[in-house]
Image (spheres, helix red, strand yellow):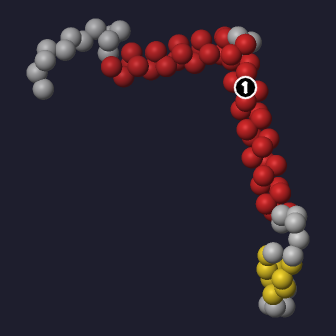
């Protein structure tokens, strides 16, 4: 059961097994998003997009080198 607000300000009680249309839309959008993500992960697992993964990892490595210096060659002197 849900309560619906009418344009004149009154309320109406509705008893139905169906969810409201807005909830149906949100659920279908969420399911579509989950399926898209699952398909992308399946492609990565299958090795179909290995170039993209390598590119992403290369970009990450470059960013870390730029942020932390030359190839991480800084030594830890143990001083805090």
Residue 17 vs residue 37: left or right?
A: right
Query: In this figure, which residue is indicated by the disc labeled 1?
Result: 40
Residue lying at the far left of the rendered structure = 79
Q: Secondary structure at mark 1?
A: helix
Residue 71 image position (x, y, % from top left): 35, 9
Q: Is residue 26 above or below residue 61?
A: below
> Number of numbered discs present?
1
Look at 21% across and 11% down and name the residue there: 75
Q: Nearer the viewer, residue 49 or 32?
A: 32
Residue in the image at 79% along x and 48% along y: 29
Question: Which image quadrant for residue 57?
Answer: top right
Identify which residue is drawn at 11% across, 21% down.
79
Relative to 15, say whether 53 is above or below: above
Can you give x and y, in whole percent of width and height, for residue 69 in the image? 32, 15
The quadrant holding residue 38 is top right
Q: Nearer the viewer, residue 56 or 14?
A: 14
Q: Position of residue 61 (x, y in %)?
A: 46, 15
Q: For mark 1, does the 10 Å Cα neighbourhood hold few (<14), some (14 to 19), or many (20 or more) residues?
A: some
Is residue 68 shown above or below 37? above
Left or right of residue 51: residue 10: right
Where on the picture, by quarter, is residue 55?
top right
Quarter of the rendering occupied by the C terminus: top left
Between 35 and 54, the residue placed more toward the observer is 35
Q: Is residue 25 above or below residue 72?
A: below
Residue 65 shown left or right of residue 57 in the figure = left
Residue 31 position in % (x across, y down): 78, 43
Task: Specify the quadrant that holds the N terminus.
Answer: bottom right
């Amino acid at each position: 059961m849900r309560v619906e607000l009418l344009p004149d300000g009154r309320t109406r009680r509705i008893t139905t097994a169906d969810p409201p249309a807005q909830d149906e839309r949100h659920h279908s959008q969420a399911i579509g998003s989950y399926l898209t993500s699952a398909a992308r992960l399946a492609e990565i697992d299958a090795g179909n997009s290995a170039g993209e993964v390598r590119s992403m990892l290369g970009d990450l490595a470059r960013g870390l080198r730029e942020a932390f210096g030359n190839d991480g060659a800084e030594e830890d002197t143990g001083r805090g």
